[in-house]
Amino acid sequence: MRILELIEYYFAHHVIFSAALMLLVGYFFGQLAERIKLPAITGYILAGVVIGSSGLRLIRPANMEMLYVVSELTLSFIAVIIGGEFSFHKLRLYGKNILILTLAQMLLTFVLVSFGLCLAGLPAYISFVLGAISAATAPAATVVIVEKLKAKGKFVDYLYGIVALDDAGTVILFSVAFALSASMMGQVELVLSTALWHAFSEILYSIFVGAIAGLAIHYTTIKKRNLNEIKILALGFIFLSTSISISLGLSPLIANMTLGMVLVNLSSKHVRILFTFEPLTSVLYAIFFSIAGAELRLGVFADFSILLAGFAYIALRMLGKYGGIFMASSCLKMDKGIRNYLGLSLFPQAGVAIGLVLFVQASPVVHNASAAVQADIAKMINIVLMSVFFNEIVGPPLSKFAIMKNLKGRVS
């Protein structure tokens, strides 16, 4: 205990010390996770829990704020990688099916969670918002596992496509659900067209920012052969795309997915840009998931009512994700591998869900609401935090299992 006090007093104030802890403890836990056949990212998340606010408290809040930059950069790379899988050739082959699968799992999840929580006794305005948030997935875990396994093929193409569209769909669904919930709270008059326009404009402006950045990378790098110069230019425009999106309240995920899609469709030579990022990604992933773990709050498990509502939310969300994919792929007569396993890869939930919760918390509608409504919002936040904790620990191993079943061709 004395050693921990000395570390906290002398070293924990420095952000580089925090980054070092995340890398070293994350590496140790990542190795332990892989020894028991779990993804390394599960180990990184657990490492964050151990050294974060729910564990030894060696990461100070001020340092967490500075380390969020790493999270934003990591998500930028992940979004570009996902966008790079959206070639027009693949869209012609799978585009219609990907759209149907995305809508099926997203809408079924929304309906099951919303009405299930209403039946469980939660107010309708909370249930609908939670239903919309439950549609969100976490692309980071998916990309890291796919890269680690070096997986390719139809299953991965569908998985990347659904994860990409799910983010845009969740923005629209959440905007409508929150407008409906705000009217139920009696704070504002429901104007559905305004909510829809807000959602679509965010998506369209994000696409515009990403497309401009993608074109800029294309025209500045297409004739260059020096990979170091290409890397500098590509990173510069990706950073610009990310910072502009965040500053304007847009979606950096959608912007950078668009950037990746523009690049891969303008020239096959741009695949080399994605390869230049590989030396950076392993370090970023280790810190990114350690940060995610350090943010998790074990205290949410102390309230029995939140436990019950949280488990209902988690179970209904899983049923919606898996059931939506299973039913839609069965109707489309798709491969058994996609039908039986693709839904398992959609359980991880993190950044987008937390971002939507923070949006609700910061909304003037909530600030002006009654004490009872604000208490319900606090409960909603804890339910989502509990889901994020559970799905970030359980989701990656299930994703790995699903991808490996298809990678190894053991699907019956």
Image (cartoon, rainbow, N blue to C red):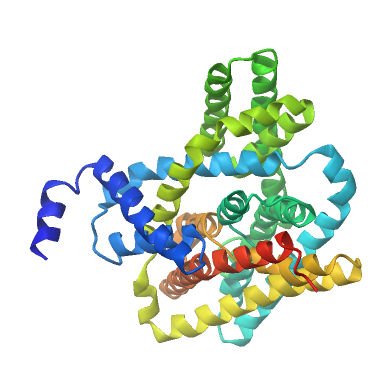
**Which residue is at a point 39% across and 54% down the rendered structure image?**
290
Locate residue 194, reporting x and y percent. 70, 50
x and y percent of residue 361 in the render? 46, 60
Disc tally is 0
Q: In which quarter of the image is the C terminus?
A: bottom right
Q: Which residue is drawn at 69% across and 50% down?
A: 164
Q: Position of residue 142 (x, y in %)?
A: 61, 55
Residue 371 seen in render: yes
Q: Quadrant of residue 267?
A: top right
Q: Can residue 186 be seen in this view?
A: no
Residue lying farthest to the top in this orientation? 223
Camera-nearest residue between 173 and 209: 209
Between residues 294 and 299, which one lies in front from this camera angle?
A: 294
**Residue at horizontal 35%, vertical 81%?**
302
| Residue 379 coordinates in the image, percent (x, y) | 45, 74
Nearest the eye: 399 or 189: 399
Query: Is residue 361 depicted above or below 302 in this figure?
Result: above
Q: Which residue is drawn at 16% across and 46% down?
A: 11
Q: In this view, does 376 lie to the left or right of 28?
A: right
Q: In the figure, 278 relative to 335: above or below?
A: above
Q: Considering only vertical position in the picture, is 190 above or below 224?
A: below
Q: In which quarter of the image is the N terminus?
A: bottom left
Q: Quadrant of residue 97?
A: bottom right
Viewer-closest of 384 and 73: 73
